[in-house]
Amino acid sequence: MTNDDSVYVRLKNRYKFAIMVLLVCAGFSSEAQTSSQAELHAAYLYNFAKYIKWPQDPDKYTIGALSDDETMEILQNTLKEKRVGGKEIVLKRIIKVEEVIECQIVYLSESNSKKLDQVKAISKEKSVLIVTEEDLIKKGASISFVVEDDRLRFKLKKSALQDAGLIPSDGLLKLAIVF
């Protein structure tokens, strides 16, 4: 066996191993999928803070979350020690809907989608970005997560951002499905 043949065999075995790992991972419970989805949502929330301009530059970025314990923990772990423009990101669990006025970004998990109207009413005079796990763009969310072609994307409602005095970057608009 030549040196090229042994390299080929090793690559072939690694390829088989990678496929096996993918097949095994694909069979895991929805809990693992929920975990990775929450991590992706956290990464998006971080980037929304980076690529949206608020009318008054905050001392820190507070992300309020109306979500379950598991999602809250994942958001906390993903966002810990992150900074935007040198400013701290603070994750706040929203207990009373009135607390949303303390936040720059409010994230509503699917189980809390029914609170969107309350969040909108309370934050109407504030510069709050409302992000929903469920597609609630047509009901007034600023940004909603959607899955298209097995890929996580987001819808952005320009008028909702304008009403809140928020300015999205051109780069963010290019990535979004804009309404």
Image (cartoon, rainbow, N blue to C red):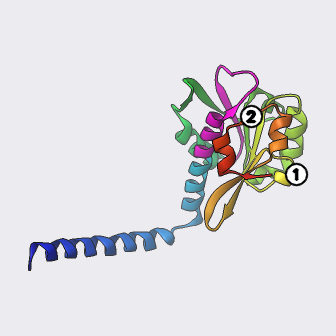
Q: Which residues are magenta?
A: 42-68
Question: Which residue is denoted by mark 2 in the rendering?
Answer: 167
Which residue is painted at 27% across and 75% down in the image?
12
Up the image or down, 150 lies above or below 137; here it is: below
- Percent position of residue 27, x then y: 50, 72
Question: Which residue is denoted by mark 1 in the rendering?
Answer: 139
> Residue 57, located in which quarter of the rendered image?
top right
Q: Which is more foreground, mark 1 or mark 2? A: 2
- Percent position of residue 123, x then y: 85, 33
Up the image or down, 5 lies above or below 66; here it is: below
Element at badge 1? helix
Which residue is painted at 38% across and 74% down in the image?
20
Q: Is residue 14 left or right of residue 61?
A: left
The quadrant in which the N terminus is found is bottom left
Q: How many marks?
A: 2
- Percent position of residue 83, x then y: 55, 29
Q: Amino acid at mark 2?
A: Ile
Q: Is residue 179 left or right of residue 92?
A: right
Q: Amino acid at mark 1?
A: Lys
